[in-house]
Image: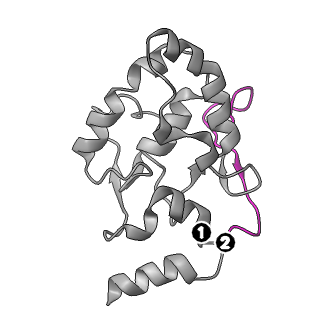
Amino acid sequence: MFILLLVSVLIYGASSTMIPNQYINDWGISSRLTQPSCVDIPENLTLCHGIGYTQMRLPNLLDHDTMAEVSQQSSSWVPLFNLKCHSDTQLFLCSLFSPVCLDRPIYPCRSLCEAVKNGCESRMRAYGFPWPDMVRCDKFPVDNDMCISVQANTNAGKFNLYVSNNIS
């Protein structure tokens, strides 16, 4: 009964904690049966350890339920970060693999995805990898919703969030 109530609140609830329905459908959040929890970002999560916050949300925004799964899946993205193809690559990837632990998920803005994609896609293709469908930029909120925006040329270590009064 509690799970049904939780799903109902997520889908039909009102207030600024509401997740936009478009993102519930795109990310499959409505099928989630486990309550999100905050866990420390371990040192062996090399992609995101030291990103600027110490706790992450599980399940993450890529639907990984365990830290073992997060570590295994994120390790394949370390080479992209090491290419230094865009200064916000780590921020973008960590916003998905180890999202900051808040009351509601905060997605990367579409502009952040597009900036990283524009900076990195040609380098990825040079190594035989297309831009993955799992991080399709049209899945992310536009910059007038609450989301993590491009940080290049801004204060290092601080997130810019775009906030709209209409995020439901």
Which quarter of the image is occupied by the N terminus? bottom left
Badge 2: how crowded within 10 Å, few (<14), some, or many (20+)? some
User: Mark 2 highlights which residue?
Assistant: 168
The answer to whether residue 50 is left or right of residue 148 is: left
Distance of label 2 from label 1 (alpha carbons):
7 Å
- Residues rendered magenta in the picture: 150-168
x then y, percent, for residue 94: 47, 38
- SS for callout 2: loop
Q: Is residue 166 visible?
A: yes
Q: Which mark is residue 21?
A: 1
Judge whether 80 appears above or below 103 on screen.
Answer: above
Please state the total of marks drawn on the protein image. 2
Towards the viewer: 37 or 127: 127
Identify the residue at image location x=58%, y=15%: 122
Identify the residue at image location x=45%, y=51%: 61
Amino acid, disc 2: Ser
Which quarter of the image is occupied by the C terminus? bottom right
x then y, percent, for residue 63: 37, 53
Identify the residue at image location x=52%, y=64%: 24
Q: Is residue 117 covered in magenta?
A: no
Towards the viewer: 47 or 6: 6
